[in-house]
Image (cartoon, rainbow, N blue to C red):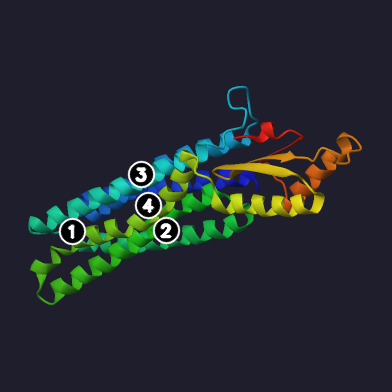
Amino acid sequence: MSNRGEQVLLKQSTILMFAVGIAAIVTGVASGSQSILFDGFFSLIATVIKVLMLITAKLIAKESNQRFQFGFWHLEPMVLLIEGSFLLLIAIYAFLSGVFGIINGGREIELGLVIPFAALLSVVCFGYFFYVRYRNRTLKSSLIQFDNISWLVDAMLSIGLLVSFLTALLLKSYGYGAWAAYVDPSILILLALSMLAPAFNILKPALRDVLGIVPDQLDDKVRQVMDEVKAEHGFADYVSYVQKHGRARFIEIHVVLPVDYPLDGVATLDELREQISAKLGKPDAARWLTISFTGDRKWIAG
C-alpha cells in the first residue's frame, strides 16, 4: 500500500469536507433549517477527524523510535474510536433536537434555497464517495475505508434532506402548509437514526483493538498453521499470541522442540521460521512476527 497515496486522498477529503461543512452552515442559517445546520456541523466534526487521520497516516509512515518501538500503529484505532464516538454523540443530539422541534410545533424553512443545495450536496458527496472507494481498491487502506464512511453518511444525509424538502414543497403546493413545518424536525430524527449503524460499524472494531481483544480470525489462522507444522515436523508443543492495532498484526509463537530433535545448527531453525512465515501469508510492513524455539516447557508457560 502506498502511504503517499493514502495521505493525498486524506488531504483531498479533509479540504472538501471542510468546504461542504461551511457551505451547509451558511445555507442552514440563511434558510432556517436545523437539519441543514446539523449536516454542516457533522461535516466540520468529520473534518477534524480527517485531520487526525492524516496526522496518523504520516506518523505510521515514519520509522519506529525509542519511545514507540513498535511504530505508531496503535494510533489508528484510537482515531477511529474518536470518530465513532463523535458520530454517536451527534446522532443523539440530532434525535433530541428533532423530537423537541416536533413538540414545539415544527419549523418553517426557506425551501427555495435548501432544495438546490441538497441536490448539489448529494451529487458531490456520492461522487466523491465512489471515487475514493475506487481509489482504495489499489491502496487497500483501512484509514481510507473508515474515512470514506463519513462521505457515505453525508451522502445519505443529503439525499434524505432533498427528499424531505421536496415532500414539504408538495405539501405546501396542495394546501398542507401546516404539516410542511414538521418535515424538517422529522427528517432530523430519521437522519439521526440512520447514523447509528455507521457509528457502531466504526466503534466495534476500533474498540476491540484499543481494548486488546484477540482478533479471532487471525488467532484461528495462526493456530491452524501451527497445528499443521507441529504434526509435520514433530514439535513437542507450542503457544501462540496474537494482537491487532489498526492494520498492524502482532504474532508471537513459541515452539517446544523434543530433546532429540535433529538440528544442524541455527540454519535449521531459520528454515523452520521461513516455512511458518510463508504459511501465515505474505509478509508486509504491518506484520510483526516473532518465532522462538526452546527445549524446556517452562519458557512457554503463561
Pointer 4 or 3: first along the chain? 3
Question: Residue 227, image x and y in percent?
Answer: 70, 52
- Dot 3: few (<14), some (14–19), or many (≥20) neighbours within 10 Å? some
**Sequence order check, earlier mark of 1 and 2:** 2
Instruction: Give the mark nearer the N terminus: 4 vs 1.
Output: 1
Mark whose residue sits in front, 1 or 3: 3
In the displayed image of the protein, which residue is found farthest to the bottom? 174
Q: Residue at x 77, y 45 (%)?
A: 235
**227 to 64, vertically: above or below:** below
Q: Position of residue 158 (x, y in %)?
A: 33, 60
Q: Give, as a three-letter code, the residue at label 4.
A: Ala
- Residue at label 4? 199
- 199 vs 1, nearest the viewer: 199
Q: In which quarter of the view is residue 161 placed?
A: bottom left
> What is the spatial separation of the Cα atoms under label 2 and label 3, in whole angstroms?
17 Å
Mark-to-mark CA distance, 1 and 3 = 23 Å
Helix, strand or loop for disc 1: helix
Q: In the rendering, at what x and y percent does residue 202 appear?
A: 43, 50
Mark 1 or mark 3: whose residue is earlier in sequence:
3
Res 166 seen here: yes
* Kind of residue sitting beneath label 2: Leu
Dot 2 or dot 3: first in sequence order is 3
Q: CA distance from mark 4 to mark 3?
A: 7 Å
Mark 1 — residue? 185
Q: Amino acid at mark 1?
A: Pro
Question: Which residue in the protein does label 2 denote?
Answer: 152
User: Which comes sooner in the sequence, label 2 or label 4?
Assistant: 2
Q: Residue at x 51, y 43 (%)?
A: 11
- Label 1: how many Cα within 10 Å (few below 14, some 14–19, many 20+): many
Q: Is residue 234 left or right of residue 29?
A: right
Q: Secondary structure at mark 4?
A: helix
Q: Secondary structure at mark 3?
A: helix
